[in-house]
Amino acid sequence: MTKQDVTFEESAARRGVESVPLSHLSIELGHLYIEEFAGGPEQLRRHFARVAPWVTAARQMAADRLPGGRVRISTCFLIDDYFTRFSTPRGVLDQLLEAIEGTGLVIDYFAREAGCAQADDIPLAELALGQLVSDPVPETTGERPPVTETGWLCNGKRSPVSGPAQAMSPHSDWLPPIQNAANRHSIFLDVELWDYEDDGTRRWSCPFLAAVWQLMRLGLLRHQGEGVTSAYQVEDWPDDWDKMPAVVKLNPRAAPFSAYRTFSVLGSRFLPIEHAVRTILSQVSIDPAVLDQIHTRSRAEHVDLPKDLVERVEYAFVGD
């Protein structure tokens, strides 16, 4: 009996990375809360009337980026069922479909904000949290606790905090926060990613869930190598939001939910939230195998795809 060499390797190293279908552009037609639905279909109609011109412009922009090619574009609509539960899935959908009629717009995918926290028993928010790599601050030694402990993420160096000065000790001058890679003047941002419910469970912040939402739309999240953006078609809509899939496909002929780029038409009140979203996305480390896969596909389709993740996310902010 001869002794043979045996090679050991992690099972994760042998696991392939699933390739998810991609459109060229994902257009978000709205991210609405209970306040918008309280005004009934007429208020929703005004929303879609403001959105429609920007959707036309986004479609043209996507076509200009892919001259001579057939552009794949899908639309989506996000409902807040995480911070406030209201109505029923069917009741909300009926209002949306009534309001959008005659606008020329089509909602391809209906998504739940709670699905950005967890979908198909996969904790998406925890998954994204594990991929955060805090932006290092120049000339510091990393004295602050990691974001996974504090729940706070910033884009630079915070103002130092000191306790009460001892008697006769020299006065310590105040120092301002400093943005990393500031353009002449700093725009410092410190983002809260979660707080806690009364029972001690994490309650994710709106900016963090919105960042997960962007990662879902960009097709960049994987769980054990598999995609996490499956969209389901639902015939019998339940009354309970928790029984709804995270993403529902409304249009059977829709292009894929995820896309190389995203474009969101949002009310102006979302400006600070999306500033926070971009700060979070700038510090997300995507699996290199996923990035390589998507870049290989984009080159094969002659799609000019920015390497910087944040540059794949675009917006139009309209009056509320």
Image: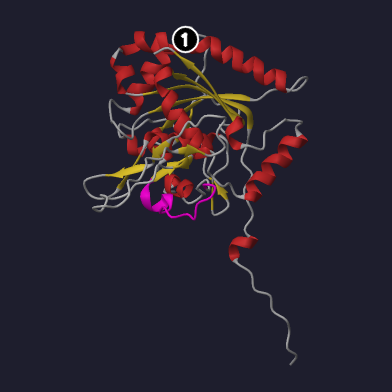
Q: Nearer the viewer, residue 269 or 66?
A: 269
Q: Is residue 100 above or below residue 107?
A: above
The residue at 75%/90% (across/down) is 2
The residue at 33%/39% (across/down) is 242
What span is colored magenta in the figure?
Answer: 137-151
The quadrant the C terminus occupies is: top left
Q: Please state the horizontal and vertical placement of residue 58, each as a whole percent of the image.
A: 60, 17
Q: Which residue is mark 1?
A: 50
Identify the image's colour scheme: rainbow, by chain, secondary structure or one colour: secondary structure
The residue at 56%/15% (across/down) is 55
Q: Is residue 255 left or right of residue 186?
A: right
The quadrant the N terminus occupies is: bottom right
Which secondary structure, mark 1?
Answer: helix
In the image, farthest residue toward the bottom: 1
- Asked if the stretch drawn in magenta spans residue 192, the answer is no
Q: Is residue 315 above or below residue 131?
A: above
Magenta stretch prevailing secondary structure: loop
Residue 120 visible within the image: no
Q: Nearer the viewer, residue 278 or 239?
A: 278
Number of residues whose C-alpha sits closer than 10 Å to that of mark 1, classed few (under 14), some (14–19) or many (20 or more): some
Amino acid carrying mark 1 in the image: Arg
Q: Please state the horizontal and vertical placement of residue 217, each as a whole percent of the image.
A: 54, 34
Q: Please state the horizontal and vertical placement of residue 241, each as a whole percent of the image.
A: 33, 34
Q: Is residue 114 left or right of residue 58?
A: left
Q: Is residue 84 left or right of residue 21?
A: left
- Asked if the stretch drawn in magenta spans residue 142, the answer is yes
Counting the numbered discs, the total is 1
Residue 286 visible within the image: yes
Q: Nearer the viewer, residue 13 or 167?
A: 167
The residue at 61%/26% (across/down) is 25
